[in-house]
Image: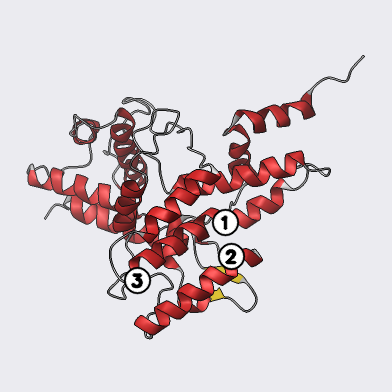
Amino acid sequence: MKATMRSRVQAYLARRRTLGYKLHREGRHLMNFARYVDQSGYRGPLTGKLALHWASLPREADPSYRARRLDIVRVFARHQAVLEPATQIPARHILGPAFLRKTPHLFTAQQLHQLMWRACRLSGQLRPVTWQTLIGLLACTGLRISEALALAVQDVDLERGVLTVRFSKCQHSRQVPLHSSALPPLRRYTRRRRRDFPQARHFFVSDRGQALSYTAVSKAFRSLTRDMIPSNRRPHVRLHDLRHTFACRVLLRWQHSRRGASGRVAILARYLGHTHLRHTYWYLTAIPPLLAQAATHFAPPAK
């Protein structure tokens, strides 16, 4: 009996995940691709035509989204070609670039206050307090939203003022020191959550005491920021923009300080959980003042 595309994809995902890769999004796309192929009745090795047709299915989608779908199948095809030499690997960039760097929206202090005010007016018993605390924590630490939602109760040490982020991106763990101003609201939320849900395992929970899902949080955040139209004309701001705002503010403050930012980017990289400095240097190009400040270090000496 010939192998199905589903069995091939499942074996590939299992092998990659044993190496530590999570492959959440990639896994969903590949399983969708496998169902599409199997339902068509095709049972042979992967072909470029199949991959291209599947990746192009959502006609109304953004071109970069279709390109990412093809790129995901392409990575799978490269692996599968070792096991099945007849596998065809789709050409690179045939649907255009798979990733287009989006200009981040940097929140002003006024917008952050507005967000907190809107959060306190949400419906529910614990929900308003949860959202105020979550937004405040993201804004003052630059945590990834996935890291904040994954925090367990024991990961938040309010005595020492330290968060423990476990097995985040690339399976790295780290400790994140908190500013003293972040501790009072976190303590208030902790007391409220313990009163309502003493057995809760996650730090941030819903009105039912369950862990918050990314989908629900992302949807609620879009509602809270519905009229905060960014200057780059994107349709909406992202949760990740809070992380960009934090990083850019830190870099700007360092640039304007007497010591400057030179030699301190590595500290920010570690704090943000970046595995390479080049990921942190991206923030230098996020806003013109940062890039202008950085450019002064490469200016030729005055004659």
Q: Is residue 20 visible?
A: no
Q: Is residue 102 shown left or right of residue 221?
A: right
Q: Are marks 1 and 2 in contact (CB under 8 Å)?
A: yes
Tag 1 secondary structure: helix
Instruction: Using the numbered discs, state the Cα–Cα distance from disc 2 to disc 3 in whole angstroms.
Output: 19 Å
Q: Which residue is mark 3?
A: 126
Name the spot of residue 37 as percent of width and height, x first.
Answer: 14, 43
Q: Is residue 22 shown left or right of residue 208?
A: right
Residue 184 marker: none
Q: Are marks 2 and 3 in contact (CB under 8 Å)?
A: no
Q: Earlier in the sequence, mark 1 or mark 2?
A: 1
From the viewer's perspective, is residue 40 above or below residue 130? above
Instruction: Using the numbered discs, state the Cα–Cα distance from disc 1 to disc 2 in whole angstroms.
Output: 8 Å
Q: Residue furthest top?
A: 303
* Displayed quadrant of residue 43: top left
From the viewer's perspective, is residue 205 above or below residue 72? below
Q: Type of residue at label 1? A: Cys
Q: Earlier in the sequence, mark 2 or mark 3?
A: 3
Q: Is residue 186 shown left or right of residue 255?
A: left
Q: Nearer the viewer, mark 3 or mark 1?
A: 3
Q: Type of residue at label 2? A: Ala
Q: Earlier in the sequence, mark 3 or mark 1?
A: 3
Quadrant where the N terminus sits is bottom left
**Residue at (46%, 64%) from the top-left corner?**
133
Q: Which residue is mark 2?
A: 182
Residue 140 marker: 1
Few, some or many residues within 10 Å of mark 2 (<14, 14–19, 20+): some
Looking at the picture, tell me which residue is in the foreground, 164 or 54.
Answer: 164
Q: Type of residue at label 3? A: Leu
